[in-house]
Amino acid sequence: MSDDFFIPVSGMDLPRFAGVPTFMRLPHVEFDHPRFQDVQVGLIGAPWDSGTTNRPGPRHGPRQVRDASTMIRAQNGITGVRPFEVLNCADLGDVAPNPADITDSLARFTAFYTKVKAAGIKPLTAGGDHLVSLPILRAMAVDAPLGMVHFDSHTDLFHSYFGGQMYTHGTPFRRAIEEELLDPKRVVQIGIRGTAYDTEDRDFAKAVGIRIIPIEECFHRGWADVMAEAREIVGTQPAYVSYDIDFVDPAFAPGTGTPEIGGPNSFQALEVVRALQGLNIVGADMVEVSPPFDTSGATAYLGASVMFELLCVMV
Ligand code: MN
Ligand code: MN
């Protein structure tokens, strides 16, 4: 273990309930920090939910997930990976949104992630509602369209809401395809379910070649088989991972704005991330944790655990 790594504060040195919470107890390293250039994976808060069409609250997600993430220890219990000793990881703080202006917030997010990408840092983001993925992709996909593994109970591929509102958490990946930030033939959406307004999103997916793996296929074929197909679709070229916590059954993740019943349990929720090992992951996010609906704190803890699994396959 090198002294050069940013090592999280151990619960052996300072009890995990003590201290100022950062993501996974890592150092807080902002752009003007003397060691900013040493960071290789940046954990970032995106406290913003102006894209929410239903029950709000994910603007409070990053703070709650930081607190819950103090439960995370340094070593993966199943794979044995110790991510903080493989790449230099740090908490880069929060992107400052403009809660009164969606367009300005999108620009602020893209500017922040452009700086992150220019520094060679892979971003791992805690949302925020799912619209935050769009400005992140605008910064990350400047060289070429990315592949994407997307865990969600919704496709987030709708054209617009409320008669022409193009920027909501139900539309980010429609915009990302239109803007050629994603290569639709290398996009897979896993766990899709629930009642629907219509088939407009699925028709679009079919037309452009996005593979949707609905929840019944996940359970009937088995998760390992589904994830093998997902890896094949995304291939070895650069890919982004977007994880909406409403992918998980609301029995395990009730603290979210648009829950859908009949989803994976918390073991399966983590197992599918471990199955991404070996992909060329350039960035990832975990979004839609809504603390006002998370009365037990279980959703934030699951979200922090998903982020740790994402980190383990990013390093
Ligand atoms: Mn979503
Ligand atoms: Mn969703």
Image: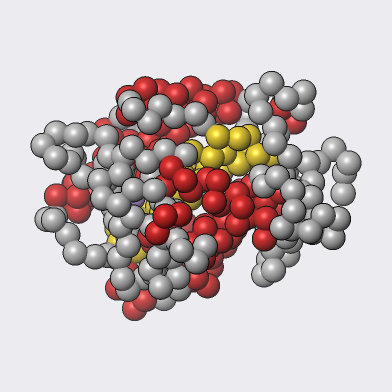
Task: Indicate whether 142 appears above or below 154.
Answer: above
Residue at (69% x, 21% y) in the render:
32
Residue 152: give x, y in percent of width and height: 36, 57
Can see residue 96? yes
Residue farthest to the bottom, as pictured: 220
In the image, taking residue 103 as reference, residue 75 lies left or right, namely right
Residue 280: give x, y in percent of width and height: 55, 45
- 66 or 278, which is in the foreground? 66
Task: Indicate whether 260 appears above or below 286.
Answer: below
- Mark count: 0
Judging from the image, the colouring scheme is secondary structure
In the image, taking residue 156 as reference, residue 269 lies left or right, namely right
User: Which image quarter: residue 165?
Assistant: top left
Can see residue 147? no
Residue 289: give x, y in percent of width and height: 44, 53
- 92 or 279, which is in the foreground? 92
Residue at (40% x, 73% y) in the render:
251
Task: Indicate whether 243 appears above or below 87.
Answer: below
- 286 or 82, which is in the foreground? 286
Residue at (67% x, 47% y) in the render:
21
Residue 237: give x, y in percent of width and height: 50, 42
Residue at (51% x, 31% y) in the render:
95
